[in-house]
Image (cartoon, rainbow, N blue to C red):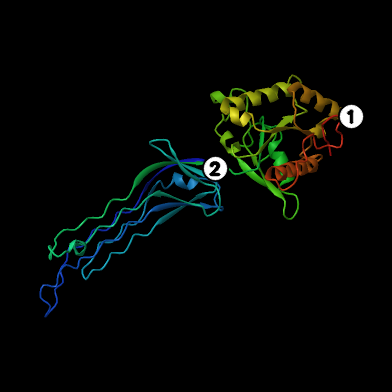
Amino acid sequence: MKFVDEARITVEGGKGGNGCLSFRREKYIPKGGPDGGDGGAGGSVVLVADTGLNTLVDFRYKRRFKAENGRAGMGSDRTGRGGADLQVRVPVGTEVYDEISGALIGELLVAQDTLVVAQGGQRGLGNVRFKSSTNRAPTRTVPGKPGEFRELRLELKLLADVGLLGLPNAGKSTLVSAISAARPKIADYPFTTLYPGLGVVRRGSDRSFVVADVPGLIEGAAEGAGLGLRFLKHLSRTRLLLHLVDMAPLAPEQDPVADARAVLAELACYSPELAARERWLVLAKADLVPEVEREERAAEIRDGLAQTGPVFWLSGVTKEGCDALCEAVMTHLESLDGSTPPALQEAPSESAATDVPGD
């Protein structure tokens, strides 16, 4: 299924039913008086968050949504039936904007969240409403009001605790497949990941977190190079960023420190707030580096980037170091929730002298 994270739709509430003009006519009852009933209210268009959806692709094929109109009132003081609300299902994490003004109308962050985006029209009034002591035979009615019409822009931002950041082929998808049940596409060429994906990392029966993998950044992404910056919005709701750097680049002239700085520069161009978010350094593909050189090379990269937070080296292929990273991340997220005391004031490593944990 194609991943689509933006869509434009039009929504319209149902028209309210007209009020009825009617007089009671019954044998042996002269001058029966007015008995025209009210119309029914128009239905509303309601967005509903659905955990079974993870893309807005359905809105590529259907873009107009209109709720049911209310029925007109009837004689014998009978009220018309109200129009049914139209429920439109969207993925959890969807933001809704008014296309004309650009204003944020609301967002749906929890399963079964609802948001009314087009109110149904008010019902009309029948002539029985205007009966009085001085107006025994009113002929006045009120027509139903049209429903609200809106042009909307839907924008999906994935809900994840942890976001992965790095160059194409830095090992992000390999890491996701190693620590979760997700199976993203993995290959030995750049831009294997074309669309964002999620993986659930479980650390026990009641401990888990969600990690988001987005397409890699390259230098010039802010100007549209590669896949540009369009998918970085999916990291905006994460609480922790893991910056993956290839510690064993294939090209001899490739500098891991320069590559990492290029990614951070593009991140700052997109959002200074996101660039300032807590970020851990994860050095991937450790299995391609001789064991005696790993800590030394990791320390060089850390010092070159002036990394002050935790630093990890690991291998997504052999899963070496993955367990230590996942446990550290889980403990940190729990400390942010206040469920456990903060445990990561320093690097979560037995080798505190180098601040570069291994397996």
> Which residue is located at x 31 percent, y 64 percent?
81
Secondary structure found at label 2: loop
Quadrant of the rendered image containing residue 141: bottom left
**In the rendering, at what x and y percent does residue 304 appear?**
76, 21
Residue lying at the far bottom of the rendered structure? 28
Residue 134 pos. (x, y %): 12, 63
Question: Pointer 1: residues within 10 angstroms few (<14), some, or many (20+)?
Answer: few
Q: Which x, y percent locates residue 69? A: 31, 57
Badge 1 amino acid? Val
Q: What residue lies at 73% left-to-right and 29% top-to-bottom?
A: 245
Contact? badges 2 and 1 (CB < 8 Å): no
Q: Is residue 100 above or below residue 248?
A: below
Residue position marked by numbered label 2 in the rendering: 3
**Closest to the observer: 342 or 308?**
342
Vertical arrangement, residue 330 with respect to residue 300, above or below: below
Per the rendering, the mark at residue 93 is none
> Given the current orientation, which residue lies at the most extreme right position?
292
The residue depicted at 33 percent of the width and 54 percent of the height is 14
The residues bearing labels 2 and 1 have C-alpha atoms spaced at a distance of: 43 Å
Residue 70 vs 286, above or below: the answer is: below
Disc with the residue nearer the chain's start (2 vs 1): 2
- Quarter of the image containing the C terminus? top right
Three-letter code for the amino acid on which mark 2 is drawn:
Phe
Front one among 82 and 63:
82
Q: Quadrant of residue 219?
A: top right
Decide which of 288, 342 is in the foreground and name it. Answer: 342
Give the residue furthest to the front.
133
Q: Which residue is mark 1?
A: 292
